[in-house]
Image (cartoon, grey):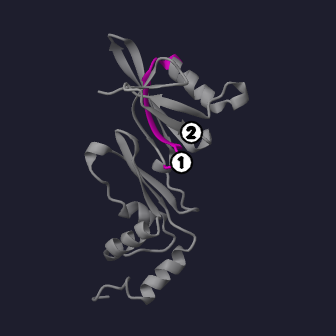
Amino acid sequence: MSLFKISAIDGVYIDAFLTDESNRLVFLSLWGRDTALQELIARLQLPKSDNGIRDFHILGHNGERHFVTVPNVDDLEKNTFKTGNTIFGVLTQMWIYDRLATKADLTNHRGLILYHQDDGRPDLWPLVKTVCPLPLLDHWREVFLARCFEKQWIKFLENGFGMSGFYVHLGDDIEAVVTEMIHNQQLQLPENA
């Protein structure tokens, strides 16, 4: 298993992470003692002037450095799990991730799917239907998803290690696009309707 270090706090190790195209934190899986992880969380919440953290580097074994920014800690969720007593003592695993991964933003038509890179590509259609303000028929799936990719409403997130994701943000012109696709007969009712 490859473990990375975090530049901001000693004794914290990373086994998976993901950022978006602007290096904003999307997912982080951390291991360490509870006190070190709590220090990290506290420093993420402090202002930068009070030794708070808004950006850091993830450091690899071969000298690689991955720059990560945390613009708004309020957009993040965290879960922690303690191991039993190991040869290293009691360790804590913490996941920090964008809350869009667990609760889509229906007002702004946004959502996020995270997945382990070894698990294969997830099904995007349920999330797209959830965040779309208009009802979508299942047989529109392929043509509508193709339009979403074409308009860059769906972005593949791959800047990381161990995790990938898809960010869905349907544009403000979603109603005009669906209307156009219906008028162009790209989206049709089933024949038996």
Q: Quadrant of the N terminus?
A: top left
Label for residue 84? Answer: none
Residue 168 point in image, percent of width and height: 46, 59
Q: Is residue 22 left or right of residue 191?
A: right
Count numbered badges in the picture: 2
Magenta-drawn stretch contains 34: yes
Task: Choose between 15 and 79: the one closer to the eye.
Answer: 15
Residue 104 point in image, percent of width and height: 50, 55
Identify the residue shown where x is 54% and y is 68%. Answer: 171
Q: Which residue is mark 1?
A: 22
Amino acid type, mark 1: Ser
Which of disc 2 and disc 1 is earlier in sequence?
A: 1
Please say if 100 is above or below 81. below
Q: Quadrant of the C terminus?
A: bottom left
Identify the residue shown where x is 65% and y is 28%. Answer: 52
Is label 1 in contact with label 2 (beta carbons under 8 Å)? yes
Task: Choose between 131 and 66: the one closer to the eye.
Answer: 66
